[in-house]
């Protein structure tokens, strides 16, 4: 079996080498690897499989939780938090997992209660930021003061835009956000100070600047790589984060109250999702080494960039566009079921075998964020004249939940990614910015957990792994 694996790996790499042998890379002087060197690497890798294999059965044999997940797919407890709680199941008297409707709590308050306001004041995300950071809801004066602190952080350092964003456009916006964030370190007179109060101040400064950085990084990219006109607006200090993003992205800087409300809601719903999410846990792990906040935040962006964590709403948008093209906006329930079966059998489009926007690591019967998004997307769809497309999303959601639950023999619900891509589309926000805007909103969650861990844990996070390799006697080079 291992020899077969080695042969397959070797042949795949070899075929790839010869496929591109006439490419520009081959002609480049000083290229990192020649064709012969690539062949050697293929040989080394193939041979290594005889020495590096870890059978899947060994994890249960040694009691190791793969991916820090229990056998019932719940997460392994790695810490304590009072910031947010993600509820997707309960425990019965025998400690068995029991599915339930999903609830997301911000500091013990159901997010649905925060959304259900008689009067929308325009700063829902900022209010959630205050709550997540300080543990209580602000009064009107406290909220205004907090917003003022963030707004005073909107401006970028002198020449930062020109030197780091316009002159150095990035092909990938998430990588560019990391680069820009690490560059901010150089503008901080005391960047390595990890005192709790200084961490809070620096974190709020990053939060205030990131919407502009994300928008400018996008504008720079499409100007340089797609030859589009470069349009630069400056952030307005009387605007919320949501209002500024819409203003920065639009040539005329105009938007409706309903549009700003929906984007504010999107930022609010992505502000935090507990300490177990990969990017938040990454932040806490890195910050526990007492490194600077810029490095910790950059590491979280790296985690969020991965398609298993952030970016799912882009895949949903692409999938739904292709489905609508295939069966039309008036597609029947039977046609939808047929498409779902084709996707699962890898017979549709990208052959991933995944119906994006459905299922969640914690939520079982429902994702409260998806339910909120469905309601507010429906309202803006009327304003935008996109009711037919919204209705298609709603009908497909119903069919997919029923079909997937039947096929998998367990409850499957839609998740927040299902409607968020559609929401961004209605707002005219390009797909390239979907995941960067996730960063903009989640910064506060990363900061809150960073501070909480510093305050109440304070130890470097240092888990263990079990060595399962052989003990081998050293062989001198001439005898190998």
Image (tube, rainbow, N blue to C red):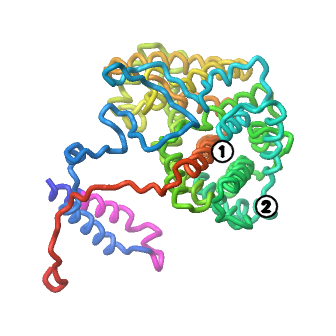
Q: Residues within 10 Å of mark 1 (few under 14, many from 20)?
A: many
Residue at 60%, 57% in the rendered image: 178
* Extreme residue toward the bottom, this view: 478
Q: Which residue is mark 2?
A: 157
User: Residue 266 is drawn in which quadrant?
Assistant: top right
Q: CA distance from mark 1 to mark 2?
A: 18 Å
Q: Secondary structure at mark 2?
A: loop
Answer left or right for 178 relative to 49.
right
For marks 1 and 2 on the same chain, the one whose residue lies earlier in the sequence? 2
Is 412 on the left-hand or right-hand side of 268? Answer: left
Q: Is residue 91 visible?
A: yes
Question: Magenta region, mostly helix, strand or loop?
Answer: helix
Question: What span is in magenta?
Answer: 9-31
Going 50% across and 23% down the picture, which residue do you hit?
102
Q: Nearer the viewer, residue 227 or 454?
A: 454
Residue 208, position as x, y percentages in the image: 74, 48
Residue 80 coordinates in the image, percent (x, y): 49, 40
One can see residue 432 in this view: no
Q: Residues within 10 Å of mark 2 (few under 14, many from 20)?
A: few
Quarter residue 392 falls in: top right
Q: Quadrant of residue 139?
A: top right
Q: Name the side, left or right, on which 283 lies relative to 194.
A: left
The answer to whether the residues at label 1 and label 2 have Cβ atoms under 8 Å apart is: no
Residue 4 shown left or right of residue 375 in the figure? left
Which residue corresponds to the image point at 42% horizontal and 23% vertical from the top-left?
A: 90
- Vertical comparison of 225 with 278: above or below: below
Residue at horizontal 61 percent and vertical 22 percent from the top: 372
- The residue indicated by pointer 1 is 440
Q: Secondary structure at mark 1?
A: helix
Q: Any magenta on residue 27?
A: yes
């Amino acid at each position: 079996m291992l020899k077969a694996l080695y042969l397959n790996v070797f042949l795949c790499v070899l075929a790839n080498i010869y496929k591109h042998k006439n490419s520009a890379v081959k002609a480049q002087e000083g290229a990192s690897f020649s064709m012969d060197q690539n062949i050697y690497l293929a040989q080394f890798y193939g041979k290594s499989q005889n020495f590096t294999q870890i059978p899947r059965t060994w994890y249960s044999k040694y009691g190791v939780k793969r991916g820090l997940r229990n056998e019932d797919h719940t997460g392994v407890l790695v810490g304590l938090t009072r910031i947010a709680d993600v509820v997707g199941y309960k425990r019965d008297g025998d400690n068995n997992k029991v599915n339930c409707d999903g609830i997301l709590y911000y500091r013990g308050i159901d997010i649905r209660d925060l959304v259900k306001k008689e009067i929308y004041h325009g700063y829902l995300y900022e209010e959630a930021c205050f709550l997540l950071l300080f543990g209580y809801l602000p009064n009107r004066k406290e909220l205004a003061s907090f917003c003022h602190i963030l707004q005073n952080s909107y401006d970028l350092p002198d020449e930062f835009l020109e030197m780091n964003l316009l002159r150095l456009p990035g092909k990938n916006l998430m990588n560019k956000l990391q680069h820009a964030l690490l560059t901010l370190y150089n503008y901080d007179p005391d960047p390595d100070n990890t005192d709790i109060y200084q961490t809070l101040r620096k974190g709020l400064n990053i939060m205030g600047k990131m919407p502009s950085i994300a928008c400018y990084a996008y504008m720079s990219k499409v100007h340089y790589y797609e030859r589009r006109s470069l349009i630069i607006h400056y952030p307005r200090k009387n605007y919320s984060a949501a209002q500024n993003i819409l203003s920065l992205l639009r040539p005329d800087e105009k938007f409706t109250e309903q549009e700003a409300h929906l984007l504010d809601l999107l930022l609010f719903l992505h502000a935090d999702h507990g300490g177990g999410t990969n990017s938040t846990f990454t932040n806490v792990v890195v910050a526990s080494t007492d490194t600077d906040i810029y490095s910790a935040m950059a590491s979280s962006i790296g985690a969020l960039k991965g398609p298993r964590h952030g970016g799912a709403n882009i895949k949903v948008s692409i999938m739904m566009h292709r489905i609508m093209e295939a069966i039309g906006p008036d597609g029947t329930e039977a046609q939808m079921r047929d498409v779902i079966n084709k996707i699962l059998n890898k017979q549709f489009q990208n052959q991933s075998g995944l119906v994006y926007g459905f299922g969640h690591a914690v939520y079982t019967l429902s994702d409260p964020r998806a339910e909120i998004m469905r309601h507010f997307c429906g309202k803006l769809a009327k304003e935008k004249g996109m009711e037919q497309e919204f209705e298609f999303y709603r009908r497909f959601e119903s069919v997919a939940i029923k079909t997937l639950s039947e096929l998998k023999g367990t409850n499957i619900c839609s998740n927040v990614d299902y409607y968020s891509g559609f929401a961004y589309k209605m707002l005219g926000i390009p797909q390239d910015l979907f995941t960067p805007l996730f960063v903009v909103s989640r910064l506060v969650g990363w900061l809150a957990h960073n501070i909480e861990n510093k305050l109440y844990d304070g130890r470097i996070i240092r888990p263990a792994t079990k060595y399962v390799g052989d003990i081998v006697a050293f062989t001198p080079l001439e005898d190998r």
